[in-house]
Image (cartoon, rainbow, N blue to C red):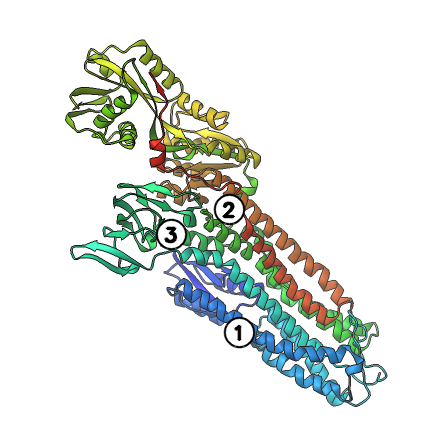
Amino acid sequence: MNVAAKGHVDLPVTGMTCASCAARIQRRLNRLEGVSATVNYATETATVDFDPTQATVEDLVASVVAAGYGATLPAAQGVDDLAAGDDGRVAVLRRRLVVSAVLSVPVVALAMIPALQFDRWAWVAGVLAAPVVFWGGWGFHRAAWINLRHRTATMDTLISLGSLAAFGWSVVALLFLHAGEPGGTMSMNMDMRGMAGMSGMAHRGAVYFEVAATVITLILLGRYFEARAKRRAGAALAALLALGAKDVAVIDDDGERRIPINELRVGMRFVVRPGEKVATDGTVVEGRSAIDASLLTGESLPVEVGPGDPVTGSTVNVGGRLVVVATRVGADTALARIGRLVVAAQTGKAPVQRLADRVSLVFVPAVILIAVGSLLTWLAVGASAGRAFTAAVAVLIVACPCALGLATPTAILVGSGRGAQLGLLIKGPEVLESTRRVDTIVLDKTGTLTTGRMTLVSVATIPGIDAAEAVRLVGAVEDASEHPIGRAIAAAARAAGSLPPVDSFVSHRGVGAEGLVAGHFVLAGRPSMLSERGMAIPAELLDAVTAARSDGRIAICAGWDGQATAVFVVADTVKATSAEAVAEFRALGLRPILLTGDNETTARAVAAQVGITEVVADVLPEGKADVVKGLQAEGRVVAMVGDGVNDAPALAQADLGLAMGTGTDAAFEASDLTVMSPDLRLAADAIRLSRRTLRIIQSNLFWAFAYNVVALPIAAAGWLNPMIAGAAMASSSVFVVSNSLRLRRFQPRQQAALTAPAAAAAAPLPVAS
């Protein structure tokens, strides 16, 4: 099938009650020609890729319905709609649970305490248990009947069979086996002994109304806690998607007016006042302020922005008034893209789930066979019909495929949601396996280890020349230039004060610039430019040039009034957190390598600052992927961190690609993990979160398998009271979801601390004169 021709749809599915349901729907969908489907029980979604020439969305919906479940075409639902749906399900479960519990307590008390067993008490127990079994358990019976009509069996089949069998046997005992006559008493043990008859009345049948009622109540309790926990698990994504602004104040020919956010278009100008959210992604055109992006990127400090700086939708303006021109709206915004990534991660399945899926397909039929086998075996060895029946019911009730089905998706749901809150995006569940295996991490230099912006780091002047005056004069000339190096000098000059006007400005491409400033004819550029103009460069300035180049920095010479007067040292500075991040990578067992297109000298200087010993320099953009391939050929499992277009091939080639979210769309799309903050330490946190999520999944699966492996033989052996079996089954699902919820407490080792660009530019410069 041509991948380019594929259609894609996420279908909301209703009626699933266990992992067996999800596995059955998935198998049914995958039988269709040209269809590849994954059904997630935790998110109640079928994620389907299909060939539109072979199947339509209507065909997919019809297939789900034919399997006995509900499916609808995906509609545009807001977060409030989704939350309301979750609240509705929880409310229904709560209502049925409360009524069932109130009725079940006296039934259990009558069965357990002989002193309460008045004449014909069993009839009262039956009357109280009937609403619990048939009204409280209606959802189980309805699902079991639908499954039966489609010749399938699920968890609901086991629950329905067990509760109806216990209730039905009890009714037969009342009507035909004299169990309701005066004089009979019954007591209960933790296992099934003592439930096979009524003391003093061996010829009478035992009643199991308390088993039928309690099993329904306990399973409703488990479903209620499970539903609440699943709602909490998805709360992070709901909170993320709710970040967006609802309306916006736009500026047009008619002045300023407020419009709904869905009417905002690319190119429109809008106002962001202090305390308001930025309505959409855009570029500042007026004003200066600080932007708090902590809810979106995890950055702990606001970032200063001004004209020309990009801003992201849903961040908060904490300073002055801004006017922003919209560059992305709707589904193209960073928030929407983050939401799609998180949803995609939550609807997929990790490779570790495959075994659980295969088990879920045959689990319920196998349990029914075990229950029948247990019944026949007990009868064959001469046990009473009551004892054999009780063992079979315990087997039906204790089995739980739900824990297997919830093990992976709930952990991914919580882990990816928590990551989104911290600005750490996991593209898909298969990524979790890669984070465990990587042993080498390749780091791009520019924009990853360094800020990606040229900054003036020092100024050296000849005696008698004030460094601040040199910055003012040369900054005025460079302010008219578009060169990144010139802009770095101009930014430092503007931060120190206003700049004088420039006359007769001329830019010499690749060499330098010149202009008339405050009565001085100023030249700034390569040392050769000044020499050609007859300006001899003094030894102290030549020493500054040599020292800068040996450190991998760029030296710009400047002169006026016929003499060379200053050297400006410009560099792409290393981020303050890069060295700490490299140390954290080592602590995670990763071997760091610096990969860059810069020269060896510059690369070595940056590597020394951050603690990296292995350097691969002078690599062309197309050669970065080849370097990764070479490392893989050596047997290494490679992670790659980058942010530029030239990093995209290497990110895609690596076993694990990590993109810094401040970079390009190409890097973003090619990566497996995305860090929405420029703080490299969060890349280490992303790996830590992924590994912890994988550990939670593995522990969930272990306990889910272990529970069933241990519980089923115990029940079949007759050592388990059916009511205790029901409590154990309900607890197993709750345990898995609760274990996953521990990921909500994940915290980065260090809170990201970003220094605002303006503050950095205003910092005092080292001066040699």
Q: Amino acid at mark 2?
A: Val
Q: Which residue is mark 2?
A: 431
Q: Residue at x 36, y 33 (%)?
A: 760
Vertical relation: 263 (above or below) 669: below
- Residue positioned 38% across, 47% down in the render: 292
Q: Is residue 719 above or below residue 350?
A: below
Relative height, residue 289 to residue 560 (above, below): below
Name the residue located 80 percent from the left edge and 90 percent from the top edge: 182
| Residue 23 in view | no
Helix, strand or loop at disc 2? helix
Q: Say left or right for 298 vs 360.
A: left
Earlier in the chain: of badge 1 and badge 3, it is 1
> Where does residue 736 sit, x and y in percent of width and height?
61, 58
**In this figure, which residue is indicated by the disc labeled 1?**
92
Residue of label 3? 335
Taking the spot 33% from the left edge, 32% from the top edge, the residue there is 761
Q: CA distance from mark 2 to mark 1?
A: 37 Å
* Image quadrant where residue 494 sits: top left
Which class describes the residues within 10 Å of circle 3: few (<14), some (14-19), or many (20+)?
A: many
Disc tally is 3
Q: Is residue 468 left or right of residue 128?
A: left
Q: Given the image, on which type of amino acid does mark 3 rest?
A: Leu
Mark number for residue 760?
none
Residue 206 visible to an observer of this rendering: yes
Q: In the image, is 552 to the left or to the right of 483?
A: right
